[in-house]
Amino acid sequence: MKLGAAMVAGLALLLSLGTTSVAAADPVPESDAQILATNFQLPFPCNQTWTGNSSNSSAHQSWEIDFNRGSTADADLGDTVVAAAAGTVVISAHQGSTNGYGNLVKIDHGGGWTTYYAHLNTRTVSEGQAVSQGQQVGTVGNTSKPGNNISPHLHYEVRLGTNYPANIQKAVFNGVTFGYPQQSVTSKNCGNPHTPTEVCGSGYDVIDSATLGSDGAVYLLYNSSNGNNCVTTLKYKNVGTATATTAYLEVEGSTRKTDSGNFAYYAGPVIASAAGKCVRWGGKAGSSTYDSPPEHCG
């Protein structure tokens, strides 16, 4: 099997994007999205304390927040940024000279809810990728449009619907509304600490993924150095507690390989060589199941 698509980059985002609906692959069901909307967590790793401010920037339209924690201007450069809730990445791109977002990741959580992570130094997810709550999406940076010199910080937004800027919502972390205009918040974003590439090993890259409602996500990876594929299912719920979780990979003409049992964090890795053949792949977490058609042939 060959890697079928390159990482998406260079997608321009105008401020008018706030009025444009972008469909996400495998969106979180609306009922689950309403639960997620009240369970967003701070977009930083577990137990870190960050100070957010909504009033320091003249570019802010509404309830956006700029986050820092260091005592010097460059102290936060390169710090980890994680997903505030599970969802699907619909934008991972540098905005170039179009606007002031710089490196931007946008995640669709279903039900019209989206989050924005801007000015990133690096982006670690790609468009169409399913991400879990607490999964790294990038690092804190100061990217923007040419001539816009800013110090490193995370610009964070929560939006509901498409009527920009009225769709910008007050941020809620761990069920508590942020204390506008400024507050220091300690992260309770203590979800699944594992990533698909960590599970499958060095050399593997995510080439496809599917959300399993709000229960988890299943990932298909490829290793270009040896031609192997890998499938893993990561849990979103009951993380750390052994519950039924499954991952499988079926190469055309071969018997399906499955890892199924009660696991605390993930099922897999399920690894097989599929050079020149199609694959079926999928998995299960909680009550949600994904089964792919024969695809990624080559």
Image (cartoon, rainbow, N blue to C red):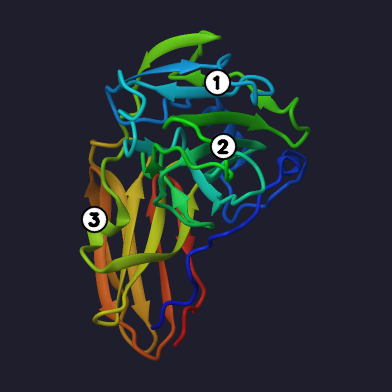
Q: Is residue 127 above or below residue 101?
A: below
Q: CA distance from mark 1 to mark 2?
A: 26 Å
Where is mark 3, residue-wise? 198
Q: Is residue 92 above or below residue 6?
A: above
Disc 1 element: loop
The mark found on residue 148 in the picture is 2
In the rendered structure, which amino acid carries the disc numbered 1?
A: Ala
Image-based side of 64 in relation to 178, left or right: right
Q: Is residue 237 left or right of residue 127?
A: left
Q: Is residue 264 above or below residue 52?
A: below
Question: Which is more N-terminal, label 2 or label 3?
Answer: 2
> Observer-nearest residue: 209 or 96?
96
* Other residues around mark 3 within 10 Å, as few (<14) / some (14–19) / many (≥20): few
Instruction: Give the labeled residue for mark 1.
Output: 171
Q: Is residue 260 visible?
A: no
Whether 47 is drawn above or below 88: the answer is above
